[in-house]
Amino acid sequence: MEKLLEVKGLKINFETQGGLVQAVRGIDFDLSAGETLAIVGESGSGKSVTSKAVMGLLASNGSIAEGTILYGGRDITAMKEREFEHLRGKDIAMIFQDPMTSLNPCMTIGKQISESMIKHQKLGRKEADQRTIELMRLVEIKDAEKRYKQYPHQFSGGMRQRIVTAAALACNPRILICDEPTTALDVTIQAQIIDLIKDLQKKLKIGIIFITHDLGVVANVADRVAVMENGRIVELIWRQIAPEHWVLLTQRELDSLAAGK
Ligand SMILES: Nc1ncnc2c1ncn2[C@@H]1O[C@H](COP(=O)(O)OP(=O)(O)OP(=O)(O)O)[C@@H](O)[C@H]1O
Ligand SMILES: [Mg+2]
């Protein structure tokens, strides 16, 4: 499979009043088309910071101290914000943990999905509206035409998460980053959202990075799992041979593989 993303030797620091925080301390991973990489690990281990770096959305006190993030062979860490704007949302999209923070409460749901298509795909209003309604149907929102004109507070938590998913998919991204996309939802809705994402992945061959604490979810969605601890990937686990067959590699084994031993 085609490699979509290659992260090499990535180190991310934050400057704080208490001194320098080394949030990510040299990690390597890659992602292929159609593959799901799960990232798990304790709170504060650097999962969100890593994914934000891939989206070019690090907080202003943060910076990439070392390493490269290659997307389609181009190093996105060297890109200017203007260039990144063309990628973000279009080639690489992200679903954040809390859908309310990524939805604008003062804008109709339909507009929030269609705006990015008008911006990135240069669609006209009418076409964008049509595609928005198709997407809303795809994520199984009933009465899409009516719902289109409503505001986020008129939607349930699960529906909002579907909308955020639809918005993320609006521009047919090649990479979708899901940062704990289901933690705010109850178990049945969680399962539905995950099925939905898996379905869409099959159809669209998206590469997915799925951050979660839930090992049940991991077993359900992941082709590979990276375990993070204190800013490092300490283990990489992947399915091989058969879906139910997992192989566990420790950091030392990984290092010796990388060294070609
Ligand atoms: N803007 C910031 N300024 C200073 N430190 C930060 C900033 N953002 C993140 N960090 C630090 O970076 C480290 C990694 O944070 P990150 O959000 O990636 O954790 P996480 O693995 O996503 O945890 P969780 O599972 O709780 O979401 C933490 O120590 C955190 O305090
Ligand atoms: Mg996080």
Image: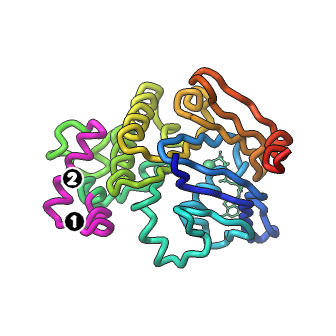
Q: Taking the image as drawn, is residue 182 in sight? A: yes
Rendered residue at 74%/58% (across/down)? 23
Mark 1, secondary structure of its residue:
loop
Q: Percent x, y for residue 52?
A: 58, 59
Vertical comparison of 43 with 72: above or below: above
Q: Is mark 1 within 8 Å of ligand 2?
A: no
Where residue 147 sits: x, y (%)?
A: 20, 45
Residue 205 versus residue 10: which sits nearer the camera? Answer: 205
Which residue is rendered at x = 56% and y = 68% of the image?
74
Between 194 and 26, the residue placed more toward the observer is 26
In x, y percent, where is residue 228? Answer: 73, 45
| Vertical order, 175 against 144 (above or below) | below
> In the image, which residues are magenta?
114-140
Q: CA distance from mark 2 to mark 1?
A: 10 Å
Where in the figure is residue 215, as x and y percent of width and height?
62, 29
Main SS of residues in magenta: helix
First in sequence, mark 2 or 1: give its number: 1
Figure check: 133 above or below 87: above
